[in-house]
């Protein structure tokens, strides 16, 4: 992975790890427990943070409106995210989850390793990064991705432009 520098810190940082849809599918082939499947799907397809998933309650899920209300998230902010298309109701019936964040983190890392994909830096939050990258790849404007992720500063969302600069590379190929 490439490195980037933050203006405020002038420190070298690694770009966030993310999984492609194919890699995520390989991980999910091994996942048996419904509550693990629910958590992984919510992070990958809706961009939820681990803490948001573990605090999620049934009353926060609007099945008819196909959305999830995230209450008192990072920074005390509220936001709305989509229920993943095709998310099985049996997974959403696992809410609230019967396990905590540390268990989900360890379980996810175990399944990544078991799947055989080469992502040593992958962790649960990588699923959220994957959501952001997939949104960009599908052409969702950066300011709308910012809203979905609940970022206060659009520069935070802009990091995902650096992870997968596909459009920039495609435009370069067209113009040069």
Image (tube, rainbow, N blue to C red):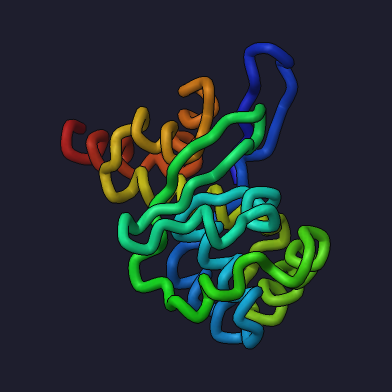
Q: In which image quadrant can residue 63 be found? A: bottom left
Residue 20 can be seen, yes or no: yes
User: Image height check: is 34 above or below 74?
Assistant: below
- The residue depicted at 43 percent of the width and 77 percent of the height is 88
Residue 125 seen in render: no
Viewed as shown, does residue 69 lie left or right of 142? right
Question: In x, y percent, where is residue 127?
Answer: 57, 57
From the top left corner, tell me how far across and down residue 149 is, in percent. Answer: 49, 39
State which quadrant residue 165 falls in: top left
Furthest-front residue in this view: 59
Residue drawn at x 66%, y 27% is 75
Q: Nearer the viewer, residue 166 or 99?
A: 99
Examine the rendered structure and indicate whether residue 142 appears above or below residue 131. Answer: above
Q: Position of residue 48 (x, y in %)?
A: 56, 51
Residue at the image position 65 percent from the left and 74 percent from the top: 36
Q: Is residue 161 left or right of residue 76?
A: left
Which quadrant: the C terminus? top left
């Amino acid at each position: 992975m490439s490195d980037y520098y933050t203006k405020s810190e002038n420190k070298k940082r690694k770009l966030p790890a993310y999984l492609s849809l194919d890699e995520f599918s390989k991980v999910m082939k091994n996942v048996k427990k419904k509550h693990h499947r629910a958590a992984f799907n919510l992070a990958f397809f809706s961009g939820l943070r681990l803490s948001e998933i573990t605090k999620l309650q049934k009353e926060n899920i609007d099945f008819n409106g196909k959305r999830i209300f995230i209450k008192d998230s990072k920074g005390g902010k509220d936001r709305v995210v989509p229920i993943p298309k095709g998310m099985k109701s049996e997974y959403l019936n696992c809410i609230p989850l019967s396990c905590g964040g540390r268990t989900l983190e360890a379980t996810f890392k175990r399944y990544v390793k078991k799947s055989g994909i080469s992502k040593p830096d992958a962790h649960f939050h990588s699923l959220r990064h994957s959501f952001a990258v997939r949104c960009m790849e599908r052409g969702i404007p950066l300011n709308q991705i910012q809203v979905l992720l609940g970022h206060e500063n659009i520069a935070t969302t802009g990091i995902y432009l650096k992870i997968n600069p596909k459009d920039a590379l495609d435009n370069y190929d067209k113009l040069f």
